[in-house]
Amino acid sequence: MTDASIAGAAPEPKKSSLLVQDARTRKRNAAEARFRMYGLGAVCTGILALVLLLASILSNGLSSFQQTYITLEVALPADKLDKNGNRDRAEMAKVSTFGYQPLIAAAMEQKMTARGISVEGLSAKDAAGLVSKEAPAQLRNFVLANPDVLDTTRTFEFLASGRVDGYYKGRVSMETAQLDKNISPEQLQLADILLEEGTLETRFNWRFFTAPDASGQRPEAAGLGVAILGSFYMMLVVLCLALPIGVATSIYLEEFAPKNRITDLIEVNISNLAAVPSIVFGILGLAIFINFAGLPQSAPIVGGLVLTLMTLPTIIISTRASLKSVPPSIRDAALGVGASKMQSVFHHVLPLAAPGILTGTIIGLAQALGETAPLLLIGMVAFVREYPAAPPEGFFDPASALPVQIYNWTQRSDPAFVERASGAIIVLLAFLLVMNAIAILLRRKFERRW
Amino acid sequence: MPVLWLVIAVLLLAAAGYVAGRQRALTSAGNDPRDLHSLPSYYGSHVFIKTAVPALIAMMLWLLVQPLVIESRISNVIPDTAISADTTRSLVMADVRRVAEGLNLAVNQGAMSAEDAARVRADTTDVRERLGEVGIALGSDVEPYVLQAAQSYRALSAAMSTWMTLFVAALAIAGCAIGLMRTRKDFRARNVVEAAILALLMLASTIAILTTLGIILSMLFETRNFFQQYPWHDFFFGLTWSPSFSGRGGASQLGIVPLLWGTLYISFIALLVAVPIGLFAAIYMSEYASPKARAVAKPLIEILAGIPTIVYGLFALITVGPLLRDYFAQPMGLGESASSVMTAGIVMGIMLIPFVSSLSDDIINAVPQAMRDGSLGLGATQSETIKQVIVPAALPGIVGAILLAASRAIGETMIVVLGAGAAAKLDLNPFEAMTTVTVKIVSQLTGDTDFASAETLVAFALGLTLFVITLGLNVLALYIVRKYREQYE
């Protein structure tokens, strides 16, 4: 009760200094630093994941842009390829690729004897195994296209088989060849000799971008031609449908729609569609476009329609944002000089919003280009070797698509297809990079701050 | 392609109408556009719309209805005796359509004259062989009644096409004439044209509703078919997933529980990866990072969001999967499989990082500065401010972001197709291969599918379940986020 008793019970005043941190402050500061490190760690983890992802894809896939070729002089005897000698294409077509296979073996043998190359325990047939199984077909197509080359000797550049190609890319070694029934160490020795000779060489692989897919036994011949064309057709469909519909929807909702139940319903629908899993759109495509409307499977038109429905929300959201950013004074000025509401929108607001709309459209297209799951359901996984025809018929021809082609290749057993798939991803990412760069440039160049 | 020609003809007429309408309006005003109610081009557009729109709409409707009418007429022609135990009416109709198509082709290629095609009898000619010559391969010999039906099918569709052409042409001409008659200098062409454009805009905006409706109806319809073949309680509560591939036996067990378990397990691991990393990254970037660091780090992390999922799938398949198997699963004796819950979960988590971080970033930035200032002014450190003021204030929004990420994870397909495996299991071991709802939708619906069997139809039931779950999560998340935003605005 007295002053003395309080003074007695009070603890000694702490000797604290501004210059020395007490334990509690140290603890708090340490916690602060730790917390900060967690944050930094999280950001770094994210970036590290990106780097790892890209490094993994690049290290696996860059080699697919290189390809090993073998140059051989092949004699084309008429008595084997055109037995009746009247150069009739229909008759010559009866000689299948099996009839051309011995020619390549003979050419290989001739090359080896001419150069004095011999590898112990290697027959001529085995030596021809260095050449891709695609080679007879290449030879046959050439002969059928130019029947007058018969009885001459021509120089051809053949693809080397996938294993030989893999040997120069580090995928196949002498040890693995020992266990592999598709290639033997002797064959690889021969390949090394041929490489020194200059018969065999590795260079840039244009075929990868233009050739169609190939069967599981000949990964070296597989290319992205049909897939790139199919993806391009789909993007055309998406652009032609999603852009007008998306812009029309946005103009209506942003400029004309009265505030009522129906408008609300549309808005809720659009925001929900943006979050619906992509595979559900595939089910929609299968049920409505293929089963109900009877459109063909694997056709770019169906893929394009499905991707259009998926892209619409993206385009609508960005278009509305850029319409909203046009200041009301522009509309008021147009209305003030006697334009109708419709004229003010189409003559003034829309042109000013165009760069933003374009940016959103490109980003939407980039999303659509990488989408895989819905395309699996509408039959795009089919093995397609024929290029689709020119539009508009080509929209109904079977085709593949870039991401689906990648998926297809991951499902094949030959490890060479992993390289192809990674290479295809590099192509896909390059397309996406270009599209996004264009979008960013457009935004930088035309974006206006009002 | 008569339809294409018809469209071109209608458009040409409409273009002519445009020119004529514009000229007529100008003439009626004595060639002085100032006396017109609207700009001259509106008069032209008015005639164009009157000509083309009703005609083209009528054509589309006709093309939609025509096959239905023909089908119902023809299927009445097929005698009931022809529908035996091993075929159905729709199979016979498919035959009829194929034969009719073959006859058309034969006539087009000149292999058969038009009269021949209409007269040919199955008992006198080998129709199968003659159609085979033009490239239509038939599975069996053509029955007389099929051929008869095919012939009347052809006759009917030819007649209907003629009628359609006449009707559409008449409509276009009438529209053009009415449009031109209306065109006078006092006619309010602009109002009419603008009303038409507005109608077009409204039509476009209903596509969003139609898409949702299409999704729901198509899945509901097929799901109903599925539940007629397979009891619903076995589907929702069955603990085994083992579809038989042999056919329509009752041998299939199609329980959704193992698939849902795989989906939720993988999504859980994905969120376990994505939420801490994404949240801390967002906090660091909005509260600590200098503007320069932010300008570099934020786009880099957002690149992750722009990478297609197939790329993540391949990353899981060729890098993460073997890595986890060789360094974790095998040494610990937990499994031999490269595709596992862990593989898919981790890779999916990486995919979701930018999703969580950019959403949380927005939400943290929306917390008013005054709250930070108040807390810092009372002597709290920055991390204490974040932990005790900002995160609690932003919590509803963050929860919304996590729910959205969860809905993404549940609906994700390619990563799990390539990374999680195909075996439906109820297991706790995260290094074991498991499968998800989306993987099974893909595997049941790719390749040759028979839309009468429960094994195919189950995919629609799975899709509907997936749709309902993700929709529920989205609606909940949007509700929470919206509610929260209103709090500070």
Image (cartoon, coloured by chain):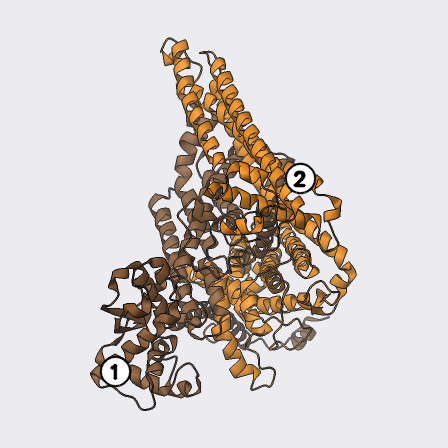
3D distance between C-alphas at marks 1 and 2: 70 Å
**Crowding near pointer 1: few (<14 within 10 Å), some, many (20+)?**
some
Label 1 lies in what chain? A
Residue B455: x and y in percent read 68, 62
Which residue is painted at 58% across and 59% down in the image? B408
Residue B382 visible in rendering: no
> Disc 1 residue type?
Met
Among the chains pictured, the one given orange colouring is B
Label 2 lies in what chain? B
Residue A170: x and y in percent read 36, 80
Which residue is painted at 57% across and 65% down in the image? B275
Residue wearing tag 2: B74
**Crowding near pointer 2: few (<14 within 10 Å), some, many (20+)?**
some
In this orientation, which residue lies closer to the viewer: A211 or B238? Answer: A211
Give the residue furthest to the bottom. Answer: A120
In this orientation, which residue lies closer to the viewer: B64 or A336? Answer: B64
In this orientation, which residue lies closer to the viewer: B140 or B393? Answer: B140
Residue wearing tag 1: A112
> Disc 2 residue type?
Ile
Chain A: drawing colour: brown
Q: Are marks 1 and 2 on the same chain?
A: no
In the rendered image, which quarter contains the N terminus of chain A?
bottom right
Which of the 4 image quarters holds residue A217? bottom left
Q: Secondary structure at mark 1?
A: helix
B299 w.r.t. A318: above or below: below
